[in-house]
Image (cartoon, rainbow, N blue to C red):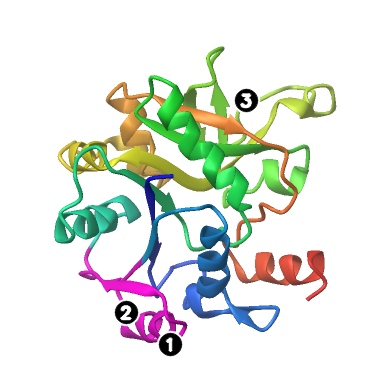
Amino acid sequence: MNFIIIIPARLLSTRFPNKPLVKIGGKPMIIRTIESAEQSGAKRIIVATDHQKIADMVKKSGKEVYITKKQHNSGTERLFEVIENFKFEDNQIVVNLQVDEPFIPGCVIKKVVNILNNKNVDVSTLAIPTNKKVEIFNPNTVKVITDASGNALYFSRSVIPWCKNYKSFKSVFLRHIGIYAYHAKFIRLYVKLLPVKIEKLENLEQLRILWYRKKIYVLIENVRECISINTPEDLKHINKFFKF
């Protein structure tokens, strides 16, 4: 399939410094994320990083890396620098695969891309059902709710939807997974849109897309392996889950 994966990898994360370089079962996170990306059939994979340490590690593994400016406000802005540098055509499909999602199966990445090809939407992304309180009530876990067509209504770090009786409705919760597919043209549009209040309040860049009435389709897949690594505690959990 004709799509390119870009993996934004920032070194100095507030919640988890040096996150792309931490080892999962003896292997750096960034390398595991690249390996997942390679299983998707992407024609090209580029790591977009702001730090030489990450660049050196990626180069050592024989993979492609591009060093971006440090002052980007979001991963999408980092993507924009990459697509402008390489002069991507407007119709080029680009997948934004976040570095802290090292276990998304390649076949699922491909499904996210297929949504963009087959539905009249601006962006496609991924969510998995969850009934775990530790995720539902955790602000580091982003939740999403959708409409009847499968398009996102809202993303939040809070519990959405709120329900009085958690046990009766625990099957309705969706945990958002950090992957997006869009055309290069849409990324160029995104960076021209002014940031909005809800985006800043939630610290979720995808809310800018919804604010300006663009469509994000949410593919729902029940994939247990999709464990995001946002904190050092998540890293301990994932090493235990996979028995590394």
Q: Residues within 10 Å of mark 3 (few under 14, many from 20)?
A: some
Q: Quadrant of residue 57?
A: bottom left
The one of 124 and 140 positioned closer to us in this rendering: 124
- Of the residues under marks 3 and 2, which one precedes in the sequence? 2
Provide the secondary structure element on which disc 1 rests.
helix
Residue type of the residue flagged with mark 2: His
Residue 60's tag is 1
Residue 175 x/y as whole percent? 63, 40
Residue 161's tag is 3
| 125 horizontally vs 67: left or right | right
Mark 1 touches mark 3? (CB < 8 Å):
no
Q: Residues within 10 Å of mark 1 (few under 14, many from 20)?
A: few
Is residue 53 visible in the rendered image? The answer is yes
Residue type of the residue flagged with mark 1: Lys
- On the rendered image, what quadrant is the N terminus found in? top left
61 shown above or below 208:
below
Front tag of 2 and 1 = 1
Q: Residues within 10 Å of mark 2 (few under 14, many from 20)?
A: some
| 54 horizontally vs 138: left or right | left
Please give the range of residues in magenta: 47-71
Residue 94 x/y as whole percent? 35, 47
Mark 3 touches mark 2? (CB < 8 Å):
no
State the residue at coordinates (52%, 61%). Answer: 38
Residue 31 x/y as whole percent? 53, 74
Residue 151 x/y as whole percent? 48, 22
Front tag of 3 and 2 = 2
Is residue 157 visible in the rendered image? The answer is no
Provide the secondary structure element on which disc 3 rests.
loop
